[in-house]
Amino acid sequence: MNTSIPTNGQLERTLSQRIQALYRDELGHRTGKITCSLCGSKAVIVIEDSITQPEQILAKEGQTTLAEEVRSELDDAIQPRLKQLIEEVLNVEVIDLLSDATLETGRTGIIAVLKMEPTVRASSATQRLKTRAPL
């Protein structure tokens, strides 16, 4: 068995950790929980508490339009680095990256459309299920 090929779960964890580091290093912002799910040739990412302090202050002061513009500009600025990070972790080309954030909930949702499914090895739990005899 080749253990150098990561499992689905390992890729999802690595992607979550690297995205969290990207937000911290590039935006100086500590996000909340990041959930990544690989679904065939798509990666679905939800970032909790993704709204930065300046955006929160603008929204709280009634400057919602300006806060949304700042969020949009930040998303545009970070998107190339996010795309590169996803490609590095999954070792697959990202052909489209869709994202949106909600000021009210502080969440960002991202869908990365991949050129193909990432190569993963079956987890030990999956292996055990496949080797079980039918009931």
Image (cartoon, helix red, strand yellow):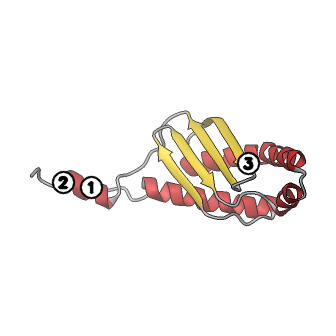
Residue position for label 1? 127
Upstream in sequence: badge 3 or badge 1: 3
Upstream in sequence: badge 3 or badge 2: 3
Graded by Cα atoms within 10 Å as few (under 14), some (14 to 19) or many (20 or more), the crowding at tag 1 reads few
Residue position for label 3? 81
Name the residue at the front extreme. 62
Instruction: Say above or below: 119 vs 7.
Output: above
What's the amino acid at mark 2? Answer: Thr
Graded by Cα atoms within 10 Å as few (under 14), some (14 to 19) or many (20 or more), the crowding at tag 2 reads few
What's the amino acid at mark 1? Answer: Gln
Answer with left or right where residue 64 lies relative to residue 15.
Answer: right
Instruction: Say which element carries label 2.
Output: helix
Are the residues at dot 3 and dot 1 in contact (C-beta closer than 8 Å)? Answer: no
What's the amino acid at mark 3? Answer: Arg
Q: Compute the Cα span from label 1 to label 2.
A: 6 Å
Residue position for label 2? 131
Residue positioned 75% across, 52% down in the render? 103
User: At which x and y percent is residue 84?
Assistant: 68, 46
Answer with left or right where residue 76 lies relative to residue 113.
Answer: right
Which of the pair 72/118 is nearer the observer? 72
User: At which x and y percent is residue 89?
Assistant: 58, 52
Residue positioned 62% across, 48% down in the render? 86
User: At which x and y percent is residue 131?
Assistant: 18, 54
Asked whether residue 5 appears in the rendered view, the answer is: no
Residue positioned 23% across, 58% down in the render? 128
Instruction: Say which element carries label 3.
Output: helix
Are the residues at dot 1 and dot 2 in contact (C-beta closer than 8 Å)? Answer: yes
Which of the pair 127/70 is nearer the observer? 70
